[in-house]
Image (cartoon, helix red, strand yellow):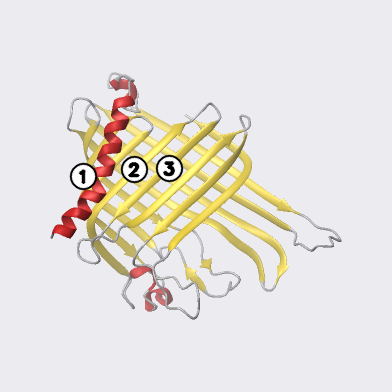
Amino acid sequence: MKTRLFAILLLFIPSLLVAQEIEKVAKAKDAALSGAPADTAKKHWLIQGTGNLAFSQAAFSNWASGGQNSLGLNAFVNLKANYRKMKHVWSNTVDLGYGFQFQGKSGNTLFTKTNDKIELTSAYGYEIHKNKKWYLTVLVNFRTQFTDGFNYPNDSVPISKFMSPGYVVAGIGVSYTPAPWFYLYMSPSSGRFTFVIDDTLSAHGSFGVDAGKKLRIELGPYIRADLNKDLSKTINLATTLELFTDYFNGFGNIDVNWNLLLTMKVNKWLAASINTQLIYDNDVMIQTDPTEPAGPRTQFKELLGIGLTYKFN
């Protein structure tokens, strides 16, 4: 029991301390801090979006040291629709990404996927404090991918597919919004549902589901922190951190999903971007060496590119 209480404190206290520090430095008026039009406005929706298409290319002709012609593209779209009226707040986010690299023939591999992401988040909040910063909130988050994934260079046996895995997190908690660029959600008890609908992957017990099953259900504390801030006129930082642990299976083993996007504008249409994602899931077994047993591993992805970008508000 003491171990569980200590783990809960480890989850919640750091986030509360960060939130309190952010509140101290947020000096804007309450109407501006809401991140949406004032209650007296005729329109209560705030709609924002960002789109990016980055590319990379390499070409060789009679190149003595060797090389392969290649073309890579990576695209992402982030849309936000936030509603505020009186004590009601409804926030919606659509985050989509897809990337690939096309190479000169190497074995049987011509096309390799470099990015694949579908993430939808919706949160309804009801104001519980007159400063318009604390809300009783119901949040739902959904994640999956567009196309099959492979452990390259083997491109014949999929290791992931659409809704294999698919993740849904749903719960009720409190949210804290001290500034338009920061959002913190804390839930003492959220459900986390892992779907593996593909028969082959399900039979192997992939992504933590029991072999032959297509759904795994977990219940535990969940924290989500979102930050989206302009560091300067040309640099924007957007990052999301999710933390979860299951009350009934390996409590204290914290699953982590951390996304970071740093965008540096060259001009109105051109920008360089760095996108990273770090994942740790204690239930996902990964084998990095055929001579060693599979086990949970820290997963990391990094994408760097320069290309067209568009932002609207």
- Residue 298 % position (x, y): 43, 61
Residue 42, can we see it? no
* Residue in the image at 39% along x and 30% along y: 46
Determine whether 139 is above or below 161 in the image: above
Give neighbour class at mark 3: few <14, some 14-19, many 20+ (Cα, 10 Å): some
The amino acid at mark 1 is Gly
The amino acid at mark 3 is Thr
Q: Earlier in the sequence, mark 3 or mark 2?
A: 2
Determine whether 149 is above or below 115 in the image: below
* Residue in the image at 57% along x and 54% along y: 99
- Residue 50 % position (x, y): 51, 37
Q: Which residue is mark 3?
A: 239
The amino acid at mark 2 is Ala
290, 141: nearer the viewer: 290
Work out how far the residue at label 3 is from the one at label 2, CA to CA, in angstroms: 8 Å
Label number found at residue 173: 1
* Residue in the image at 30% along x and 40% along y: 184
Tag 3–tag 2 contact (CB < 8 Å): no
- Residue 304 % position (x, y): 59, 48
Residue 207, can we see it? yes
Q: Is residue 55 left or right of residue 251?
A: right
Work out how far the residue at label 1 is from the one at label 3, CA to CA, in angstroms: 21 Å
Work out how far the residue at label 2 is from the one at label 1, CA to CA, in angstroms: 13 Å
Determine whether 198 is above or below 181 in the image: below
Q: Is residue 162 left or right of residue 179?
A: right
Q: Which residue is mark 2?
A: 225
Q: Is residue 312 left or right of residue 22?
A: right
Indicate the secondary structure of the residue bearing disc 1. strand
184, 112: nearer the viewer: 184
Tag 2–tag 1 contact (CB < 8 Å): no
Give neighbour class at mark 1: few <14, some 14-19, many 20+ (Cα, 10 Å): some
